[in-house]
Amino acid sequence: MRPMRLASGGLRLPALGAALLCFTPALAQAQVSAPVLKWQRGGCTAGGCQTGWYASPAVADLDRDGLPDVVWGAYDVVALNGADGSLKWRAANGNRVWPGVAVADLTSDGTLEVIAGRGGDLLTVYNRLGTPLWSVNPFGSGEVRTLAVEDLEFDGQFEIVVGRASGGAIRQLNAFTPAGAQRAGWPARHDGEPGAGWGMYNQNVTVADLDGDGRREVIGPTDTHYITALDNNGAQLRVNPVYTGRQFWAEVGVHVDHLVDVRGYANCGVEHRPNFADSAPVIADVNGDGVAEIVVVGNVYNCGTSPYTSLYQMPFILKLDRTRWSGSGFDWTAIPLPGPNSGPQAEDYNVIESALPNPVVADLDGDGRKEILFPSYDGRLHAYWLDKTEHGSWPYDVPGAGIRFAGEPVVADLDADGQAEVLFTSWPQKAGAGVGQLHVLSSLGVSLFAIDLPASFPAGIWNGGLGAPTLANIDADADLELVAGTAHSGVVAYDLPNTPDARVLWSTGRGSGKRSGVAKPEREYRSGFADVPPWHIFYPFVNTVALNGVSSGCWASPPLFCPANGISRAEMAVFLLRSLNGPTYVPPACTVPLFTDVPCSSPYARWINELVAGAVTAGCGPTTYCPDALVTREQMAVFLLRTRFGSGYNPPACTAPTFTDVPCSSPFAAWIYDLVARGITGGCATGAYCPASTATRGQMAVFLVRTFGLQ
């Protein structure tokens, strides 16, 4: 079939954009199909498989061969061929990998790095071929179980944030540059600062810009009832004045009753509080009002017994000022009441490996509000709606003989019916050779499939999946696959038949391949564009632009983005104003044409006129705009900075050119080097910017995301 050209010349108009962004299900909906084992024992040797822990696999095209790779860590970090699980490379090490391996382009040079936290206080960054680039010991002792990668200042450089799994009231978190240097202001909290805290024994950090100031905050629960909250430079975040006599998050303990938080101490035995030793927080806008909240599950215990008595695990929803969240008719000042049999089935890892209450936040029922899912030591997977109840058949009791625990789930609407499915792996007690299962549940917690995981290799011991699986397309077909790390059979992969139109809501451990506790459009997610698959170099930027309503592609059927095509000056007007003002923005209608080649009947007229009104451009000649002319990379620099900072903005003068093709005498030099200084671009090749080259749509996506801080 010949592709249908959009009437707008490549831009879907506002009334159509949102609808065309969606994956449109077929009229006759397919039912969810049973997963089918694709391959197993990924990363194992002929002698057996290393013990796997809680690491979630990552999926990315590391070597840029156009084929997705699966990356996972047990002790060694391995990269596997997605199609058949064969080994591509192995980075051997004797220390275990607890957190999910992160994958990111740390230096924005177009190549991916692999980041692993390990026992032995070890943080290592590998290049795309598995060669170690650098290693550091972030704390001097303990284990690195907390790991996240994020751009703390939106400058195009990713930082690595790690947490310490060992005792000590300060210096729980540290941050490093892409080159492995410790950032100024870290580790934190600092010596002598007020507050309380201890070690971080799970993936205890989330990173996001909570207040929209262009700098990301770092939230880290600790092995106490206190939460450490820091800015991008390691300084403590302040709390609401309701907490009299206390300034910072780490000074305000969390209790079941918020009035006890305000008072500042608990009457142990009567007033209970949570411990956050194993608490992996997430950040999400739970009610869709545009403001992000912090979700953390705590182990509520009785501090009046010796030893303390664990009672139940329950989520808390907090705001940036540390108060409890309420909104849209829901009030989480008081947390939900626990149901029957909510206490721990076991807390002894000699009996069964620990159940870690990693929350997942996703809209299960399609009502625009998110539910909170988490596995618990009560042997169940929970799902709380914002009304503080569990709907349908939730919670889900993990089936099987003896004690069984669930891992962190992933969430996707597999059959595109508007109701999401929940997928997770489970594990049995250590005694015997039992195996856990791959579970698929409906949005209301009804079991659709429970499939035994492979037996251990070598045979004779238990096996299961402790960490979150990952949803991605790892082969050449149109369907999703699920890949999971296991305790004793390496990485396993399952085909998920009939999922070409699946919508992925939470794709992997901690929400993305950066493990930052935020679900974002990432390389693991599926794009609506046939020409920008998840392993495409521009995928995260194209997907971000699309999800922000800036552009929904160049062709309607099949959906294409055309990343290698140039951008016309007309299209650029829309992209700039949508990036600046949001997806619903529409400029005033054209009543008087400003250019002879842009009549008011043009769908671009209002956008071009608005750019002129903002003095971003004056056209290409005295009376013309040249709407069909393609934008060059040097012109793009001016467009971006004038739109972002206003018509009066003048960049610093060029004094020391770093590109051989952009001398200071160029009228565009100051604008180009300002983009470089802001981390928006690094040029087109070593020592070159290619100023006269046409800016492609893929490059445009990168420029827009970085200039306007799109997320």
Image (tube, rainbow, N blue to C red):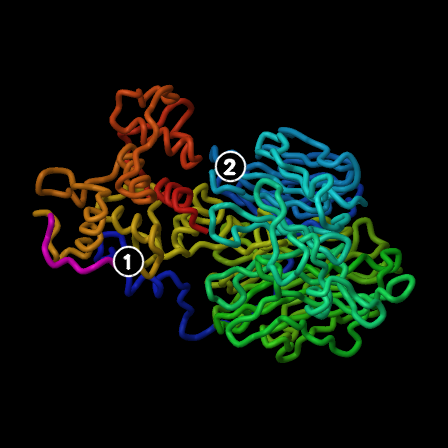
Which comes sooner in the sequence, label 1 or label 2? 1
Which quadrant, please, contains the N terminus? bottom left
Where's residue 561, x and y in %? 35, 50
Q: Residue at x 57, y 57 (%)?
A: 320
Furthest residue toward right = 306
Q: Which residue is the site of mark 2? A: 157
The x, y position of residue 49, in whole percent, is 77, 45
* Amino acid type, label 2: Gln
Which mark is on residue 12?
Answer: 1
**What is the span of residues highlighted in magenta in the rendered image?**
586-594
Q: Position of residue 332 (x, y in %)?
A: 62, 71
Residue occupying the point 57% across, 34% down: 128
Crowding around mark 2 (Cα neighbors within 10 Å: few <14, some 14 to 19, many 20+) is some
Q: Residue 253 or 374: which is nearer the viewer?
A: 253
Q: In this picture, is 139 found above or below 357?
A: above
Say which amino acid is labelled 1: Arg
Q: Residue at x 65, y 56 (%)?
A: 281
Q: Is residue 592 magenta?
A: yes
* Element marked by disc 1: loop
Is 703 situated left or right of 540 in this image? Answer: left
- Cα–Cα span, label 1 and label 2: 32 Å
The residue furthest front is 245
Reply yes or no: does residue 145 show up in magenta.
Answer: no
Q: Is residue 181 above or below residue 483?
A: above
Relative to 435, say whether 516 is above or below: above
